[in-house]
Image: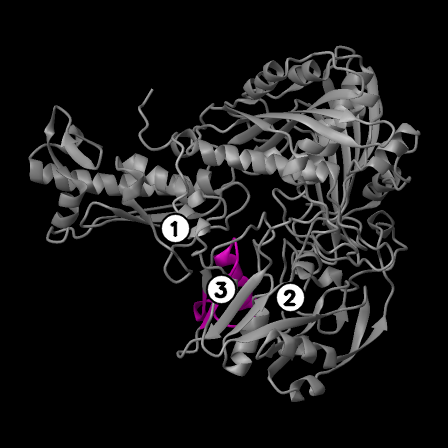
């Protein structure tokens, strides 16, 4: 095995000192000469026509420099997802409570808020759609009457269906007839907020040359730039986006959010303009996740092999198709071999806040349903849940739901590691239970670029377009250092903006270390090749006779004969080929699955319904842990988010207006340190074929499994299965009393009939 000098070692984040001393600059810290404050006026109606907006009184208020409405923007539709179904600001119609209808730029926040109160909006109320299950039907009122005109809109049944995805394999009907047992269940998840610490923030100024500079707390500066150019109808080259340091995003900051408002106000007023959301606005203005309803039907043989799966998933998309329903198809089977499939996933419009991304949007919902159902099936068959999973788990060479051949992976190793650590199966005392869940994801790919410059002192400058959220800059620096054979301290990670850095996809979808890291490795190898060529010329040996380590390039057979990177860097200033820059660019990487097995032990108080998490163990195949300390932190953080989803977190949505009823951290109950047991993490390393030094993705999969693992542990403890998230004491007591959630189930027969009637284009 190769000796690793930098990767595989735990390193403190390269920005740790700036963060802990408070010197890191966020958008809120930005101060520009003459900067104004922007505040938003939002809709108080769920669905209404805008009859008029009178901003005259607001404009007359001293200290107000500008007011804009939807009519001040070009009449352009854009999308948070595949469908171009929304304007950046409401123009003629509002579709949910909280939709922006006007924005003010003033000298200070108090003046801006006073101006908002002076804006008069007259509405004409329209029919409201709140229940996505009822909204599917042909008789339901329409959220968007012009939906068929949206670019990218594709549907099979029309109406409020904003998206539909499907996958078929084998002969499902025959497989169900052949099955010895058939099981049907429906599960439902809750609306949930990403819970990032730093609210959405952005600022904009117009440079002397007329170009627009936007400072944003964003995961995707290039995506913000392109969408901003679209909604403002200006050239892409007229915009520079500076990605500031981020205080969390978890997918919520991937796309254009509010940057267009200070941008247009900056153009109108000639002043820099800054917008900072309040905590309440973080709940009511930016896309969370809404509830999902999942129907599963599974056919198994008497030996316990799964042979058929039918799934119908209804995603409440809110007013606009944001992060869509793709997970309802791609994760409706889980990491299991199922030869016959019929999977359908629907995204349904309602008059609620639109959905956004949250750590692999929808996969946690699907994992809760699939892994709870898997446990339920195993127990009804009289099989041990762990052994049932081992029997049906995918292996190398099997075909995934999407048709990809599954490469070598560590799924079975994670299963066995958790089984051994938990000592399963085991007998627990009364009221205690253990549950497990398998999580699957993939290492994200997409366009990635990197450049590495060798400096005269032997340091190197690393430049990428990716945004650091959870220490990824440190991991990228480690990859560069390892490939170049230099200490981590000799890698300088440059701060970047869209003018300076090469294009890359947003930081999200578990893609940075796998995809961006591969680009960094390739750029380092490109630089190293050029260093070898220069050193070979100076040392009088062939390039293939050289090696590198500890900041030197040397002759393998005679290590003292060599040159430091500093010496080579200075030589490049006078060499015919000039300074050395290693560059790399890639479009995509092959499929590299990520598997995580989790186990939860709980204690359930039957009198109060309180569920206490006693122990939590997880094992994930990380391929190669570039920075083990960072990897473990990501795994633990993801698990905590999943535990919160399981036990306490829920956005309460008014069923008549769609308004968020608990928009604060005092009433949206995220777990605290006192609620958490020690999270035991086991790293499995089965290297991927294509990731940098064998690394796989890490971040998202640990958040998928806790709801199912805890649900299965509750069943093990008290013998009742709860199919509705979160597992509050009220729900536990209701389940013990034989009362499940209200019957608001998917009308599967109606969907099947509608699909049979449907003809022509529209299926995705």
The dot on residue 77 is: 2
Who comes first in sequence, dot 1 or dot 3? 3
Q: Secondary structure at mark 2?
A: loop
Q: Residue at x 32, y 27 (%)?
A: 4
Q: Which residue is mark 3?
A: 29
Percent x, y of residue 8? 39, 29
Instruction: Say if 236 sits above or below 450 in the image.
Output: below
Q: Which residues are magenta?
A: 212-240
Looking at the image, which residue sits at the far bottom?
Answer: 60
> Is residue 451 visible from the viewing direction of this image?
yes
Residue 446 in magenta? no
Along the polypeptide, which appears first: circle 2 or circle 1?
2
What element does badge 3 sit on? helix
Q: Residues within 10 Å of mark 3 (few under 14, many from 20)?
A: few
Is residue 113 toward the left or the right of residue 145 in the image?
left
Residue 99 appears in which quarter of the rendering? bottom right
Spatial CA span between label 1 and label 3: 24 Å
- Single out the mark in the foreground, 2 or 1: 1
Residue 232 painted magenta: yes
């Amino acid at each position: 095995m190769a000796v690793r000098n930098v990767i595989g070692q735990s390193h403190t984040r390269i920005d740790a000192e700036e963060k802990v001393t408070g010197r890191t600059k966020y958008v809120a810290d930005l101060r520009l000469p003459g900067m104004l404050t922007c505040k938003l006026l939002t809709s108080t109606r769920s669905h209404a026509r805008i009859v008029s907006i009178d901003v005259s009184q607001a404009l007359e208020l001293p200290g107000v420099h500008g007011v804009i409405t939807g009519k001040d923007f070009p009449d352009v539709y854009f999308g948070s997802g595949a469908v171009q179904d929304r304007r950046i600001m409401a123009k003629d119609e509002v579709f949910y409570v909280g939709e922006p209808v006007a924005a003010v730029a003033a000298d200070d926040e108090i003046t801006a808020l006073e101006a908002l109160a002076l804006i008069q909006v007259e509405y004409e109320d329209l029919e409201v759609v709140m229940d996505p299950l009822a909204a599917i039907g042909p008789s339901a009122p329409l959220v968007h009457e012009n939906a068929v005109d949206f670019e990218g809109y594709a549907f099979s049944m029309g109406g409020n269906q904003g998206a539909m995805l499907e996958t078929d394999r084998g002969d499902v009907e025959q497989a169900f007839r052949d099955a010895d047992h058939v099981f049907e269940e429906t599960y439902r998840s809750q609306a949930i907020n990403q819970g990032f610490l730093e609210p959405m923030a952005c600022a904009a100024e117009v440079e002397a040359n007329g170009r627009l500079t936007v400072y944003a707390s964003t995961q995707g500066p290039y995506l913000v730039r392109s969408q901003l150019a679209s909604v403002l109808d200006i050239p892409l080259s007229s915009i520079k986006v500076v990605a500031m340091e981020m205080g969390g995003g978890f997918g919520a900051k991937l796309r254009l959010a509010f940057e267009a408002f200070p941008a247009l106000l900056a153009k109108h007023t000639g002043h820099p303009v800054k917008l900072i959301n309040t905590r309440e606005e973080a709940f009511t203005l930016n896309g969370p996740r809404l509830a999902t309803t999942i129907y599963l039907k599974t056919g198994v043989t008497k030996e316990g092999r799964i042979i058929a799966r039918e799934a119908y998933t209804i995603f409440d998309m809110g007013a606009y198709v944001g992060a869509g329903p793709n997970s309802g198809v791609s994760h409706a089977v889980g990491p299991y071999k199922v030869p016959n499939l019929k999977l359908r996933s629907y995204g349904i419009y309602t008059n609620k806040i639109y959905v956004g991304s949250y750590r692999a949007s929808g996969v946690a919902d699907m994992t809760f349903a699939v892994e709870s159902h898997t446990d339920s099936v195993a127990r009804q068959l009289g099989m041990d849940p762990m052994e049932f999973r081992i029997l049906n788990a995918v292996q190398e060479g099997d075909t995934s739901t999407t048709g990809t051949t599954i490469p070598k992976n560590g799924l079975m190793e994670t299963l066995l590691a958790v089984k051994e650590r938990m000592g399963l199966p085991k007998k627990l005392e009364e009221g205690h239970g253990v549950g497990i869940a398998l999580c699957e994801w993939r290492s994200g790919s997409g366009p990635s670029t990197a450049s590495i410059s060798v400096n005269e002192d032997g340091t190197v400058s690393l430049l990428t377009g990716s945004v650091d959220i959870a220490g990824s800059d440190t991991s990228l620096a480690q990859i560069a250092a390892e490939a170049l054979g230099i200490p981590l301290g000799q890698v300088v990670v440059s701060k970047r903006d869209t003018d300076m850095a090469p294009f890359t996809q947003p930081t999200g979808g578990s893609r940075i270390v796998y995809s961006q890291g591969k680009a960094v490795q390739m750029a380092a190898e490109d630089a190293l090749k050029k260093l070898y060529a220069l050193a070979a010329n100076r040392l009088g040996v062939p390039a293939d006779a050289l090696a590198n380590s500890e900041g030197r390039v040397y002759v393998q057979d005679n290590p003292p004969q060599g040159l430091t990177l500093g010496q080579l860097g200075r030589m490049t200033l006078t060499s015919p080929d000039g300074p050395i820059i290693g560059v790399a660019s890639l479009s995509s990487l092959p499929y590299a699955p990520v598997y995580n097995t989790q186990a939860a032990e709980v204690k359930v108080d039957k009198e109060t319904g309180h569920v206490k998490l006693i122990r939590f163990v997880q094992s994930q195949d990380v391929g190669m842990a570039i920075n083990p300390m960072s990897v473990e932190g990501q795994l633990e953080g993801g698990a905590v988010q999943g535990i919160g989803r399981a036990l306490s977190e829920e956005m309460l949505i008014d069923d008549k207006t769609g308004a968020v009823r608990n928009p604060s951290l005092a009433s949206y109950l995220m777990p605290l340190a006192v609620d958490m047991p020690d999270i035991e993490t086991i790293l499995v390393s089965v290297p991927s074929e294509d990731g940098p030094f064998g690394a796989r993705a890490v971040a998202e999969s640990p958040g998928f499994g806790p709801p199912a693992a805890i649900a299965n542990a509750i069943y093990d403890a008290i013998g009742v299965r709860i199919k509705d998230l979160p597992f509050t004491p009220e729900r536990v007591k209701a389940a013990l009393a034989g009362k499940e959630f209200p019957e608001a189930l998917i009308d599967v027969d109606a969907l099947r009939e509608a699909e049979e009637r449907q003809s022509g284009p529209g299926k995705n």
